[in-house]
Amino acid sequence: MTQTATTRLLIIGPPGAGKGTQAHRIAEGYAVPAISTGDIFRANIKGATELGKKVQAIIETGELVPDSLTNEIVADRLAQADAATGFLLDGYPRTVDQVAALDAMLEGESLDAVVLLEADTDEVVARLLNRAQLEGRADDTEEVIRHRQNVYAEQTAPLIDLFSKRGILVTVDGMGSVDEVAERIASGLNGLLSAKVVS
Ligand code: B4P
C-alpha cells in the first residue's frame, strides 16, 4: 500500500453498508486508528456517562446526535497522540455542517480519500436485522433501521457530491463477501493515494 506522511481517511455509506466492518481492516492496513462516532456514543451509553445519557434516546430513534456535541467529541479524539499521523473516520462527518467543522479542525489539511461504500437498501436492512439477532442493538429494529436509511439519504448523501468535487471520492460496491469488498477498497484507495503521491 502506498502511504503519504499522514493518511486521513473517511468511510461513508448507508447504515449497514459495512463501514464498521471494513473500517478496522483499512485502518490496520494504513496503521492509523479507526475512529467511529457511533462506537464512541455506544461506549458512553454503556458506561452511563453524562454524554451517554444525553445521546441514548436520540440514537435509539435513529436520529442524528446534534452537530455541536458530535463535533466536540471528534475534536477531542483527533487531538489525541495516536491520530497525529492520520486516522480513518467512520460515520463522521455525516452532515454538511460537520464537514465544515472537520475542515476547521484539520486547519487547511484536507482528507486524503473518502471511501463511499454502496449497497442495496434491502440488503442493508437484512444485514442489520441479522445483527439485531446477534447483538441486540436498540437501533436495529426494522422501523428504526428504515428511518436511519432516510436520515442518511436526506442528511448524509449530499456529502457524496461535495467529496466528489474535491476529487477524493473512491466509490466501492459493498455487495459481496467481506473479503471481496475489502479487496475493492484496498485497490481503489491504492489507486487514488498513489496518484496523489506522483502528482
Ligand atoms: P453508526 O455506529 O455509524 O451506525 P451505522 O451507520 O448503522 O453503521 P454501522 O457501523 O453500525 O453498520 P455497518 O455499516 O458497519 O451510528 C449509529 C448512530 O450513532 C447513528 O444512527 C446516530 O444516531 C449516531 N451517530 C453516529 N455518528 C454520528 C454523527 N457523525 N453525527 C450525528 N450522529 C451520529 O454495517 C454493519 C453490519 O453489516 C454488521 O452486522 C456486519 O456484520 C454486516 N456486514 C458488513 N459487511 C458485510 C458483508 N459484506 N456481507 C454481509 N454482512 C456484512
Image: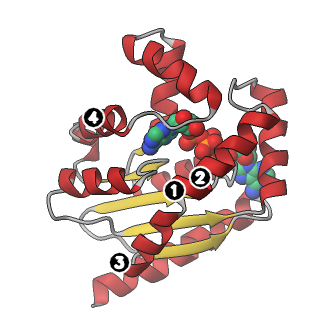
Task: For the residues labelled 4 and 3, say whether their Cβ atoms are less than 8 Å apart.
Answer: no
Asked if the beta carbon under badge 2 is closer than 8 A to the nearest atom of ligand 1, the reply is yes
The answer to whether mark 3 is within 8 Å of ligand 1 is no
Q: CA distance from mark 1 to mark 2?
A: 5 Å
Mark earlier in primary sequence (3, 1): 1
**Secondary structure beneath label 1:** helix
Verify CB contact (< 8 Å) between mark 3 and mark 1.
no
Secondary structure at numbered mark 3: loop
Q: Which disc number belongs to residue 156? A: 1
> Where's ligand 1: which quadrant?
top right
Q: Are marks 3 and 2 in contact (CB under 8 Å)?
A: no
| Front of the two marks 3 and 2 | 2
Q: CA distance from mark 4 to mark 3?
A: 25 Å
Considering only order in the chain, which callout, 1 or 4, is on the residue closer to the N terminus? 4
Residue of label 4: 72
The one nearer the camera, 88 or 198, is: 88
Q: Spatial distance from mark 4 to mark 2, Cα to Cα?
A: 21 Å
The answer to whether marks 4 and 2 mark residues whose Cβ atoms lie closer than 8 Å is: no
Q: Which image quadrant is residue 103 in? A: bottom left
| Residue ID at (33%, 56%) | 99
